[in-house]
Image (cartoon, coloured by chain):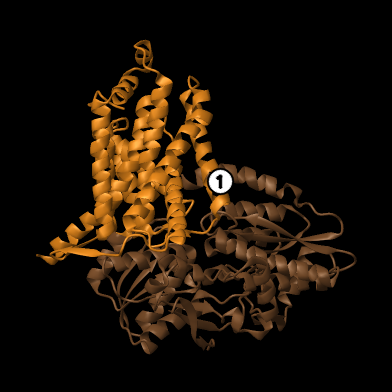
Chain colours: A orange, B brown
Amino acid sequence: MNPSLALFLQQLLNGLGIGMVYALIALGYTMVYGVLQLINFAHGEVFMVGGYLAITAAVFLTALFAHAPVVLVLTLMFVFSITGCAALGAFVERVAYRPLRGSPKLTALITSIGVSFFLQNAVMLIYGSKEQGLPPVLPDRLFFIGPISFSLMQAVILAVSVSLMIFLTGFVKNTKMGKAMRACAENAEAASLMGISVTRVVRATFVMGSGLAAVAGVLFSLNYESVNFHDGYLAGLKAFTAAVFGGIGSIPGAMIGGVLLGVFEGLGAGYISSGWKDVFAFVLLVVVLIFKPSGILGENIPEKV
Amino acid sequence: MRTMRKGIPLFLLSLFLCAPASAKDDEVLIGLAAPLTGDQAYIGVGVLQGAQMAVEDANIRGPVFGNTKIRLVPIDDQHNPAQAVLAANKLAADPDVMGVVGHFNSSCTKPASAIYHESRIVQITPASTNPEISRQGFDTFFRVCATDDVQAPVAADFVFSKLNLKKIVIIDDQTTYGKGLANEFEKKFKSLGGAVLLHEGIAQGEKDFTPLLTRVKSTGPELIFYGGVYPELALLLKQSRKVGLVAPWMGGDGIYDVTLIHLASAEIAEGTTATMLGVDPHALPAAKDFVTRYEARYGPIGSFSAYAYDAANVLIEAVRRAGKKDREGVLREVRATKDFPGILGTVNFDARGDAVGKSVGIFKVTNGKFEFLEEVKPS
């Protein structure tokens, strides 16, 4: 294969991995926005908490059982982190957002920034300000297709994210709760007149969004093998960009937005300048907002959640 | 956006933190400015603890003059230049503050130094190595550490002559410290006749460097020099393994921290070299007492705790000699410091306020520890 083509494909693959993580977080932003028209800025922090919970589970398990099978450790990391984050999401919704239902949207938005600070500093106080390392869980295996290499971790990220996205799409399309979510997104008042409990739908949305962020957090901590209480900030901002880029409120939009953002960033960093990586992400956002303010898939899709 | 989101509540927090700073009549205040929260809080807390021990030791010895004692006022700059300026203004506004130990990051020390200069407060940084800071012509600025124009050429010479590697890639974290160090390295390395294949920046706080490393790999370097601090280097090391980049890495004092090895794992960090300002305090007889007491109290000593201890002691000694609450007087006495017996060696300042005669140590990660290789005296 032509070496520069191989390099290009390699960079594409690099971008795809982080893009999937962005997409998973972006889904939470977009789902909450769909139902409540609230940009939940604390969502990035939930992702970060997911990473910490995963590391806690891994440290605990590897300390307790020196030779625990990898699959078991991985499963428990996911279960622990998803349960914890889903509970956190439901709790935050109950304590911070539900009392503000019906107040101006800006109030809830500012509250979400407050929640974000609270979670960041709470985690810093609990775990300390130092980076937390993850004991190696997955073996460091590299696979090659011709000259292109990908790691076992990249394969896991792709497999987990894609199957979750398929599951989520099916859930929103086919289940009763999914239909209720779509109904609330369409018109919450009318939905409640039809006997749908908006409170329950909102709670379910937060729980699912936080669960997805937890999965992203686990994948992130597995891939980078360290977590810092700051990590939710930039990743959350990027995922928010991805959600807006794809069309906020649209589930397929968040997936596409996340993946495209990751790839775009990766190519920009690989070919132009890695110091400008964040700049590429936000320039992309500005350009999209200028030419298509509703995002790639925004508005055209009636069934936004 | 970043400063905005963090800035507002931190500003409020700093108001609370500084509210009780006004001293009683029998107290002299010394500011300690460092990143006490935020991504580099770990290093900042080590600096605080070092300075705290110096103040406690001084107060045990007795009042500095009359019946006046020293009190340390910690203030947080979050490793954020805007916060550093706020912190400096807070300290400057308090007439009982006679001097400041700090800041940690060059990017914070530089803007803050202008404020200290204006309000005639003497500032001694334990760790900011960017050479530009002392070239602004501020007579209130001092440092007890070496500068990057001493450190980086030593590193470049080591790579070119000792390791005999001629083709390298440079990566920096685009901060005042990281970029300054990387530029000094590049200048010296090129003047020796070496080839710099690529010099790229990364954004601090970023986690995914695989696109950059893939590109670095395609240029085929023999070594990669990193200007920056250890958290990003740990990720760079691990991810270079993932993209199949095998060249060894080298960095400056910012990567000399055992946490690097914990984060990257001993196996992956193996062979990474670092220049450090001076030698390991564990190896210095004069520092033994301090290191033992520090580690008994706080656990493993931070890379800059001993520097903070020295900086605070120089300042306290100056206050003692000045004999009254007078900023100009304290400044004059710091300037008059001669052969001060610091635990890391004798402290003397040149006309710019830079430490004189600070040697540079070269360390290499061997079996999960930074092993001392050699010491280079400044020429």
Residue B67: image location, x then y, percent: 89, 64
Residue A180: image location, x then y, percent: 32, 21
- Residue extending farthest to the right is B66
Look at the picture and state if B341 lies above or below A158.
Answer: below
The residue carrying pointer 1 sits among few (fewer than 14), some (14 to 19) or many (20 or more) residues within 10 Å by Cα, namely few
Residue A162: image location, x then y, percent: 24, 44
Q: Secondary structure at mark 1?
A: helix
Instruction: Indicate the quadrant where residue B118 lies.
Output: bottom right
Indicate left or right for B17 with B278 as reference: right
Q: Which residue is at the front of the view, A20 or B3?
A: A20
Look at the picture and state if B260 lies above or below B338.
Answer: above
Q: Residue at x 65, y 55 (%)?
A: B75
- Residue extending farthest to the top is A193
On the question of residue B245 being in view, the answer is: yes
Q: Residue at x 24, y 40 (%)?
A: A256
Q: Residue at x 27, y 41 (%)?
A: A164
Q: Which residue is mark 1?
A: A122
Indicate left or right for A75 with B56 as reference: left
Instruction: Indicate the quadrant where residue B308 lies.
Output: bottom right
Q: Which residue is at the front of the view, B94 or B287?
A: B287
On the question of residue B325 being in view, the answer is: no
Instruction: Indicate the quadrant where residue B191 lies.
Output: bottom left
- Residue extending farthest to the left is A1
How many numbered marks are there?
A: 1
Specify the amino acid type for callout 1: Ala
User: Which chain letter goes with mark 1?
Assistant: A
Q: Residue at x 73, y 47 (%)?
A: B19
